[in-house]
Image (cartoon, helix red, strand yellow):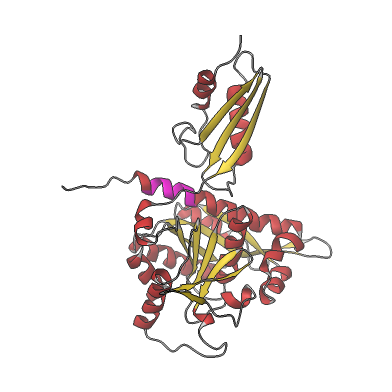
Amino acid sequence: MSVTNEQVMERLRTVNDPELHRDIVTLNMVKGVAIDGGAVNVHVELTTPACPLKDQITQDVQRAVMVLDGVDKVEVEFSAQVRGESRLQQSLPGIKNVVAIGAGKGGVGKSTAAVLVALGLRRSGAKVGILDGDVYGPSIPTMLGVEGQKPKVNGEKMVPVEAAGLKIMSIGFMVNRDQPLIWRGPMAHGVVKQFLEQVDWGELDYLIVDLPPGTGDVPLTLAQSIPMTGAIVICTPQDVALLDARRAVMMYGQLNVPMLGIIENMSFYICPSCGHRDEIFDHGGAERAASEMDLPFLGAIPLNAKIRQFSDTGVPEKTFSDADARVASAVEAVAHAAAGQISVQSMKAEQQPTLSIE
């Protein structure tokens, strides 16, 4: 007896997305079923090309469909369509998700983590931009090897500089490298709003915003200007750094910005010569803090000379190809975990009830 499409679809209703916790049929992730004798091909459209649980979905689909009589083989093919908030489309057409990356204090590698997350998402096939919101200490142009370049102007809007597949905007393009920006809060507020509203970002799946450290004007400006998808806090394992990270988390809560999770940077060191792992600044503090605050822990980025070297020389994308395999794998896992939580939050936002008054 030959299997039918209806039977396959019914079995696929038993397969849940591991992060969205709803079945893939209801989520409209099943885009096609092809049957050739005993071979079944299922086309699944993921909510992000950086899905961290693709293998699990494959196994769950195969397990669900293989129980049908007459099925000998199940293959799963994937495509991806990043989903975003409709509210954000009204403010920034073409941009699906805006993700702020901040820290409670300086010196924790926030900008490095922001760039690595952006590059990890880009490597998966997503369209990504990065806005350097650290107006007092802009470092993104240097880290991405575009220091000294100037954005072009198209009509009334600036065109982002591009490097490593990312669209980039920074106050660092407008001022000399050594010029200090001695600004009051309203001036920083105005620059951030201009970068949001007067830059031609085009179509983006993710706009990553590298915030200045602390709990000052720029996060407030973002929260008041656009419906952000969420925020990620970077911290190091030490207790003092974790105290500041907790304050940053509380700030986003007060601003009604969803928390996507916490990343532990400089989490451990792997000796390039012997492979020995050393936890110089302690280890696991961010994961414990995330658990205590009931937040996702997005992973740990190691302390690594290659990451520092590639960032200083403007080629951070080499982290994924030329660094120790364990380092590259850890960084990629963090980016994929962030993508997963962005998808979860986007779905939650779309499910929020709205009041319509006619």
Visible residue check, residue 125 = yes
In the image, is residue 17 above or below residue 152?
A: above
Closest to the observer, 85 or 181: 85
In the image, is residue 292 above or below residue 213?
A: above
Horizontal side of 256 relative to 14 (left or right) equals left
Q: Is residue 343 highlighted in magenta? A: yes
Q: Residue 10 location in percent, x, y?
A: 49, 22
Query: How many numbered markers are drawn?
Result: 0
**Farthest residue toward the front?**
155
Name the residue at 58% across, 65% down.
166
* Residue 71 quadrant: top right
* Residue segment shown in magenta: 342-349
Closest to the observer, 221 or 110: 221
Closest to the observer, 218 or 244: 218
Q: Residue 309 location in percent, x, y?
A: 71, 73
Tell me the quadrant of the picture where the N terminus can be found. top right
**Farthest residue toward the left?**
358
Q: Residue 303 location in percent, x, y?
A: 68, 67
* Residue 246 quadrant: bottom left
Q: Is residue 256 highlighted in magenta? A: no
Name the residue at 44% across, 70% down.
199
Q: Main secondary structure of the magenta part?
A: helix
Name the residue at 50% across, 72% down.
159
In the image, is residue 196 above or below residue 17?
A: below
**Farthest residue toward the right?**
273
Visible residue check, residue 216 = no
Q: Residue 88 location in percent, x, y?
A: 38, 57
